[in-house]
Image (cartoon, grey):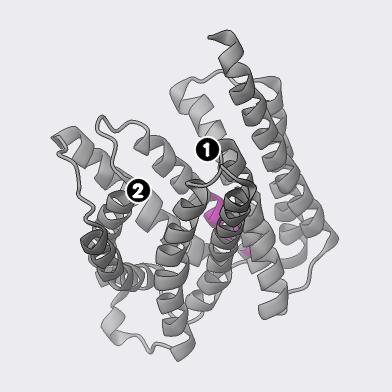
Amino acid sequence: MDMSGKTQGYCYLAAAMALVGSTVVASKVIGTGLPPFTATALRFAIALPCFALLMAVTGARLPRLGRRDWLLLAAQAIAGSVGYTTLLIAGLQRTSAVDGGVILGTLPLVTAAIAIVLLGERPGKAVLAAIAAAGFGVWLMTRHAAEASGAPSWIGNALILGAVLCEGLFILLNKRLRVPVPPLALSTVMTGFGLAFSALACVAESPWQISVSGDALWAVAYYAVVPTVGGFLLWYAGAARVDGSEAALFTALAPASAVALAAGLLGESLTGAQVAGLACVLGAVALLGWTGRRRSAAAPARS
C-alpha cells in the first residue's frame, strides 16, 4: 500500500469517527423533542432504504444463515441497534453531551471487559491497566456530575454507559456467528430488525400524541443518513486502505469529536473533571491499541 493510499485511508477513518462523535450532539437535540423509541424507529425508517439501495447498487447479498445465526442477529439488533440508540438518547436527556462523548469513548475497553467476564478471555497487564484507566476517567465525571447536578446527571451517565455495554455485546455477538455476514448486509439486516423492534416498543410512547419539534426531526434525519450511512461508507473505505490495528486506533477520535462538538455547537462548558476523564479514556484507548499492535507484530515470530 503506497503512502498516498494510506493517507487517504486515514482521512476516511478520521472523518468516520468524527461523524460517530456527532451522534452524541444529534442525540442530545433529539432527546429534547422526541422520546427514545420513537426517535430510534424514525432513524431506522430513514436509514433502511439507503442501505437497501446500496445493496442493490453494489450487488451485495446476504449469505444463507441457519436459525441460530438469525437468532444471534436478532439479539444483536436488540442490543446494538435499539438498545444503544434508545439508551444514548435517554441518557442525554439527563446529562451533558460532553459527559456522553467521553463515556462513548470507553467502547473498546468495555468490549474487552465483556470478553473477559463472559468469554473467559485472559487479559494481559496492559489491557487491565487500560480498563482501569478508562473506569477511573468515567468515575471522575460521574462523581463530578453527582456533586454538581445531583441524581439525574448520574443516572444519565449510567444510561449512556449502558448504551456502550449494548454496543460491546453487539460486537461480541457478531463474533459468535457461524457464517460471517458482509458489513453492508449486516448493517442492512440490523437496520431492518432495529426498525421492527423499535416500532413495536414506541407504541408505548404514544407517538401520535406527541408534539414534535423541527430540530428533533432534522437531528433524526441527520443521524440516520450522515453518521449511520455516511459513516459506514467512510469507515470501510478507510479500513480497506490501512492495517486493522491502525484502524482501531482511530476509534479514539470519536469521544474527542463529541466533546469538541458539544462545546462548539451546544455551548457546553468543559470542567476539569471532564477534561481529566477524557484524558484517561483517550490514554486507555491508546494503550489498548498499542498493546494490540505489539501482539499482532509478535504473532509471526510465534508461528
Q: Where does the image place residue 42, in percent across and percent down from the top left? A: 32, 73
Q: Where does the image place residue 62, in percent across and percent down from the top left? A: 20, 47
Q: Nearer the viewer, residue 187 or 212?
A: 187
301 relative to 63 in the view: left or right: right
Tell me if residue 1 comes above or below residue 35 in the rendering.
Answer: above
Q: Residue at x 39, y 87 (%)?
A: 212
Circle 1 — which element? Answer: helix
Magenta extent: 153-161
Q: Is residue 144 magenta?
A: no
Tell me if residue 148 comes above or below residue 126 in the rendering.
Answer: below
Which of the 4 image quadrants contains residue 38? Answer: bottom left
Q: Which mark is residue 111?
A: 1
Q: Amino acid at mark 2?
A: Pro
Is residue 135 among what the camera can see? no
Tell me if residue 110 comes above or below residue 235 in the rendering.
Answer: above
The residue at which mark 2 appears reads as 183
Q: Where does the image place residue 271, in percent across and percent down from the top left? A: 82, 64
